[in-house]
Amino acid sequence: MKIDRFGMYNYLTMKVTELKTKYKNKWVLAQIVKEDSSHNILDAKPLKISDDREEIYKHLQKLKKGAHVATLFTGETPPKGMTFTFYVSI
């Protein structure tokens, strides 16, 4: 795979379920390719995959403003009642 100028790999588009299976317990920065009417991501193109969340955030800052992307963690979800808030300015 080639690495682009942002240090991101040129991955193929895949279903989110495949992505979560192939890259277990990883942080993923992905371009959203297809979503349903409720904005659930169905297909995505991974741009960067890492064990380190901060590495994903650094690459997120390098994207063009308005890029249609998402950050995902493919591990277990937090326990019920625990919430997270993310703020990213691009």
Image: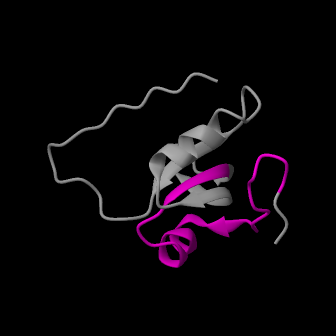
Where is the C terminus found, in terms of image quarters?
Answer: top right
For this orientation, the residue located farthest to the top is 89
**65 and 61: which is toward the camera:** 61
Left or right position of 35 against 54: right
Left or right position of 7 against 48: right
Left or right position of 85 against 42: left
User: Is residue 71 in sight in this rendering?
Assistant: yes
**7 and 43: which is toward the camera:** 7
Residue drawn at point x = 14 percent, y = 43 percent: 81
User: Is residue 37 in sight in this rendering?
Assistant: no
Where is the N terminus found, in terms of image quarters?
Answer: bottom right
What color scheme is it? Answer: one colour
**Residue extent of the magenta highlight:** 4-31
Residue drawn at point x = 41 percent, y = 31 percent: 86
Q: Position of residue 63 (x, y in %)?
A: 73, 36
Among the 4 quarters of the image, the one containing residue 19 = bottom right
Image vertical order of residue 2 relative to residue 61, above or below: below
Q: Position of residue 68 (x, y in %)?
A: 69, 39
For this orientation, the residue located farthest to the left is 81
In reply to whether residue 57 is colored magenta, the answer given is no
Q: Position of residue 44 (x, y in %)?
A: 65, 58
Residue drawn at point x = 64 percent, y = 60 percent: 43
In reply to whether residue 30 is colored magenta, the answer given is yes
Image vertical order of residue 3 relative to residue 31, above or below: below
